[in-house]
Image (cartoon, grey):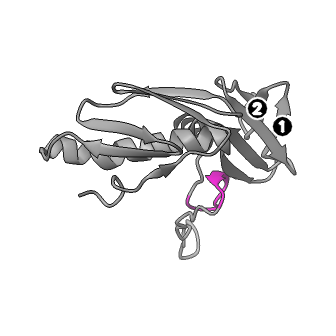
Amino acid sequence: MSRIGKRPIAVPAKVQVTVDGTKVSVKGPKGELSRELPNNVIVSQEGEILTVNRRDDSRTSRQMHGLSRTLVANMVEGVSKGFERRLEIQGVGYRAQVQGRNLVLNMGYSHQVQIVPPEGVNFAVENNTNVIVSGYDKEVVGNTAAKIRAVRPPEPYKGKGIRYAGEAVRRKAGKTGKGGKK
């Protein structure tokens, strides 16, 4: 039995969960999410607790058990608390700002890079160098943060670029020469 899959999911008081066969819909104060789960799993609701079980012990059912439980748990947590991903910008002259809903990045290119948030995602900027991506869908928040990081990933020599908060960037030694060309 999957250690993750057999754990029950507690549903907060403000969240409504609707299970219709393999489709699970979750509605809460932050937003509304729905997902079609594989046929190999069964989601059952008993009061304020959701449980995810598998139909049989086939290999695909075992694979989908823990995944489906985690997806449903992330939906419940997202509509009740929400998710956020923090990014740090390092480099001289690199900065970010919010214009309307859009994020505008000055990353050393000849132009500003403008990122339009998908529905349900918000941007916030602290000190021109810390970007906070927040929303209720964990998958969309993570993908949006990855797109922002891809604008200028951290380079290994000086560490300049956009990185996730707490991300360790492997550094390389620079060039070492004998004394120059003659």
Image quarter in which the C terminus is found: bottom right
Looking at the image, the residue that sits furthest to the bottom is 178
User: Which secondary structure lies at badge 2?
Assistant: strand
**Residue range highlighted in magenta:** 156-165
Residue 55 shows in this picture: yes
Residue assigned mark 2: 103
Q: Could you tell me how far apart the alpha carbons at marks 1 and 2 are, in whole angstroms? A: 6 Å
User: Mark 1 is on which residue type?
Assistant: Gln
Q: Position of residue 65 (x, y in %)?
A: 29, 46
Q: What count of labels does the image hold?
A: 2
User: Mark 2 is on which residue type?
Assistant: Leu
Q: Residue sitting at 66 percent across and 23 percent down?
A: 119
Q: Position of residue 178 (x, y in %)?
A: 53, 76
Residue assigned mark 1: 97
Q: Residue sitting at 60 percent across and 53 percent down?
A: 154
Q: Position of residue 39 (x, y in %)?
A: 25, 29
Q: Position of residue 157 (x, y in %)?
A: 59, 62
> In this orientation, which residue lies closer to the viewer: 110 or 58?
58
Q: Residue sitting at 74 percent across and 33 percent down?
A: 122
Image quarter in which the N terminus is found: bottom left
